[in-house]
Amino acid sequence: MKDKQPNAVRVGILMGSDSDWPVMKAAVEALKEFGLTAEARVISAHRTPRDLEQYASSARERGLRVIIAGAGGAAHLPGVTAAFTTLPVIGVPMLGPALAGMDALLAIVQMPPGVPVATVGINAARNAGLLAAQIIGSGDPALQARLDAFKEKLAAESRAKNRTLVP
Ligand code: RP5
């Protein structure tokens, strides 16, 4: 029933701190380009773990289809989110001050067998939004058509770059 509501929130965007928002808002913007509505929350695997359990374990029944989780440093947020739901979880490693984002990247990508997290590049929140749209689009022909048009636009822009080269 919730799937029939056009403006229903389909994607949950989590981040470990409000300091992640300047990066994570790119996911919201990407989703908007495809008419998808997201909700955003600061929830931390370390500072508010009980809130995370509550959020992740109730996400599906609230109508969410995908969760995007961004965190930096000892970035457990995407993995712990995935522990509490079978919704697809996309992890966004945040570029931190100490280890150039490698700490978060490795923490997010190296999940144990059985608990997958789809990890995008460091600070690649836009790609996380696009991947969420593609996951939802796999069961939605109208959204799939918009994604196909987006791919065609990307290809046209790439071909156009040839015009700037020396012949
Ligand atoms: C992580 O620690 C957050 O995801 C953020 O990337 C990083 C720093 O958090 P703050 O010190 O800005 O709250 O948990």
Image (tube, helix red, strand yellow):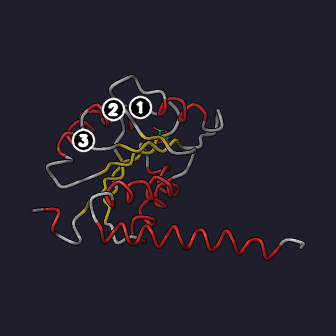
* Label 2 element class: helix
Find disc 1 in the rendering and name its residue: 76
Evaluate if marks 1 and 2 touch, with contact meaning CB atoms under 8 Å apart: yes
> Residue at the left extreme?
1
Q: Position of residue 68 (x, y in %)?
A: 38, 48
Residue type indicated by callout 3? Ala
Q: Earlier in the sequence, mark 3 or mark 2?
A: 3
| Residue 101 falls in image quadrant | top right
Name of the residue lying farthest toward the front: 167
Residue type (three-letter) at the residue carrying disc 1: His
Q: Nearer the viewer, residue 87 or 98?
A: 87
Query: Could you tell me how far apart the alpha carbons at marks 1 and 3 are, in whole angstroms?
Result: 14 Å
**Amino acid type, callout 2:** Val
At x 22% / y 72%, what residue is drawn? 6
**Label 3 belongs to which residue?**
56
Task: Give percent across and percent down for residue 72.
Answer: 51, 39
Residue at image mark 2: 80
Q: Which mark is residue 139?
A: none
Answer few, some or many: residues within 10 Å of disc 3's Cα (few below 14, many 20 plus, some between 14 and 19). many
Relative to 82, is 70 on the left or the right?
right
Q: Mark 1 and mark 2: span between their CA atoms?
A: 6 Å
* Image coordinates for residue 146, horizontal then vertical, percent: 40, 72
Q: Is residue 63 above or below residue 154?
A: above
Answer left or right for 130 relative to 8. Answer: right
Are dots 3 and 2 in contact, CB under 8 Å? yes
146 over 92 or under it: above or below:
below
Mark 1 vs 3, N-terminal side: 3
The residue drawn where x is 46% and y is 60% is 25
